[in-house]
Image (cartoon, rainbow, N blue to C red):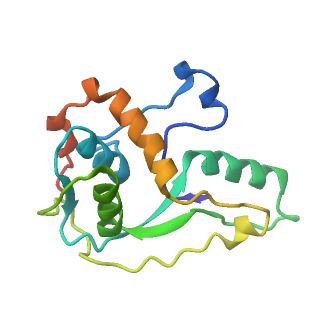
Amino acid sequence: MHQGIVWGTQTEETMLHENLVNRFDYDGVYGTVLNRFISQAATGNDITVYGTGGQKRAFIHIQDTANCVKLAIENPADGNKVRIFNQVSEVLSVKDLAELCAKSYDGKVAYVDNPRKELAENDLGVSNAGLTSLGFEPITLNQKLVDDVKYIAEKMKENLNPDNILTSPRW
């Protein structure tokens, strides 16, 4: 199973009690680009895009990650066949994601030098057809779900250190 960038912190099961909420990493090593953007907005900082923002990324909600694993287990491959599943709900550019967050949180997008050695723009052709053929119905990044993640960021606002947000190693 090839997994996209996981976003969100709660599944149906973790919503049963606040002690079950998953980690919310926003730093440059463990955090995801969406968590970083939401953390920046929640702390009143600019939403920082590395380079042009033309980098495309595959995203999947944490609930979908669990559902995809369940679907794969419940539908074993025939015989000795190998199946490869792409656990993705949608593909977005970093720039589009930043603009969605800026619009959602009345924030400002700032473009900074990219600390990573990667193309300024890329096409990402990925299909989740294998999982959708088994009944996967992806959760896409929409306002309600962005608000769910923003709630976590605001709830943890006192623990968010703006100095840890732009800490991506140079590679």
Quadrant of res 88:
bottom right
Q: Position of residue 33 (x, y in %)?
A: 33, 53
Foreground pick, 47 / 32: 47
Image quarter of the N terminus = bottom right
Pick the residue in front: 24 or 117: 24
Q: Is residue 161 left or right of residue 113?
A: right
Q: Nearer the viewer, residue 83 or 107?
A: 107
Q: Residue 41 sits in which quadrant? A: top left
139 vs 66: above or below: below
Q: From the viewer's perspective, is residue 47 above or below residue 30?
A: below
Image coordinates for residue 104, horizontal then vertical, percent = 35, 54
Q: Is residue 11 left or right of residue 142?
A: right
The residue lying furthest to the right in this view is 79
The foreground one among 104 and 64 is: 104
| In this rendering, position of residue 66 left or right of residue 50 | right
Q: How many marks?
A: 0
User: Percent from the top left, x then y, of residue 163?
Assistant: 14, 36
Residue 28 visible within the image: no
- Residue at point 19% right, 37% down? 164
Q: Name the spot of residue 6 as percent of width and height, x first.
A: 49, 50
In this rendering, the answer to whether 120 lies above or below 43 is: below
Q: Residue at x 69, y 53 (%)?
A: 68
Say which residue appears at 26% left-offset and 53% top-offset: 106
